[in-house]
Amino acid sequence: DAGVIQSPRHEVTEMGQEVTLRCKPISGHDYLFWYRQTMMRGLELLIYFNNNVPIDDSGMPEDRFSAKMPNASFSTLKIQPSEPRDSAVYFCASSFVEETQYFGPGTRLLVL
Amino acid sequence: KNEVEQSPQNLTAQEGEFITINCSYSVGISALHWLQQHPGGGIVSLFMLSSGKKKHGRLIATINIQEKHSSLHITASHPRDSAVYICAVEPNNNDMRFGAGTRLTVKP
């Protein structure tokens, strides 16, 4: 398996633009997690899905953030409108049941 | 006070040394994770444990649920072990919480 795949790897956008981050989990995994990492706040869990259903989105910072998982092999994290403080590295991870999580390479987002 | 405290924040060791990184937490948890983040930014999950001890190669992780404490040990450290090690806990009925990380540098 190729592991968790994220795209794009880097994204530079202007304030106010919509940003969509994509994640393909490892085949067969039933949990998918979205994390954000900044220098100031470290790693934070934003939301996670089980069998494509959002279980806990309490970590999502505000209404500008939304995440979907239309099927078992694809998830998106959308920011609309983006702001400079959203600049961070966004990681996606997946796991089978509640075991070891496998992390994607991350998407480095810069909002100007 | 952060719910997850790691120590030390920074650690420099000589190749071959035995290394210990500590993690203390203040909430009841269902599991604890040790993550490794390489200089390039990639994150690897090293261990997930809820009791006792786990070993993988030169890495050993222990947890004491009563004392709310976990340690990550690296035996015969090597420069390629240089990374940031992050402790993360799964509180009962709550979001995962992360420590600030321990930056390890192993010199040849």
Image (cartoon, coloured by chain):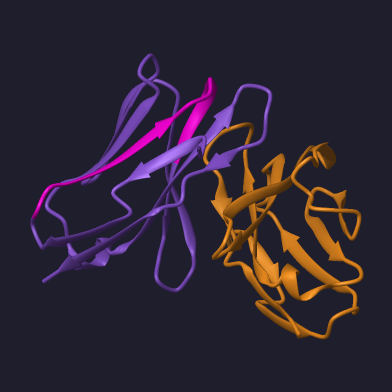
Percent x, y of residue A17: 90, 79
Q: What stretch is highlighted in magenta?
A: B17-33
Left or right of B23, for residue B90: right
Percent x, y of residue B82: 28, 64
Q: Which residue is drawn at 68% across and 44% down?
A: A28
Nearer the observer, A26 or B55 = B55
Q: The purple chain is which one?
A: B
Percent x, y of residue A44: 63, 50
Q: Which residue is drawn at 62% across and 22% down?
A: B92
Q: Which residue is drawn at 17% across and 62% down?
A: B78
Position of the C terminus of chain A by quadrant: bottom right
In the displayed structure, B84 sits above or below B29; it is: below
Does residue B81 show up magenta in the picture?
no
In the displayed structure, A60 sits above or below A54; it is: below
Main SS category, magenta section: strand
In the displayed structure, B57 sits above or below B84; it is: above
Q: Which residue lies furthest to the top in this view?
A: B66
Left or right of A103, for residue B17: left
Chain A shade in the render: orange
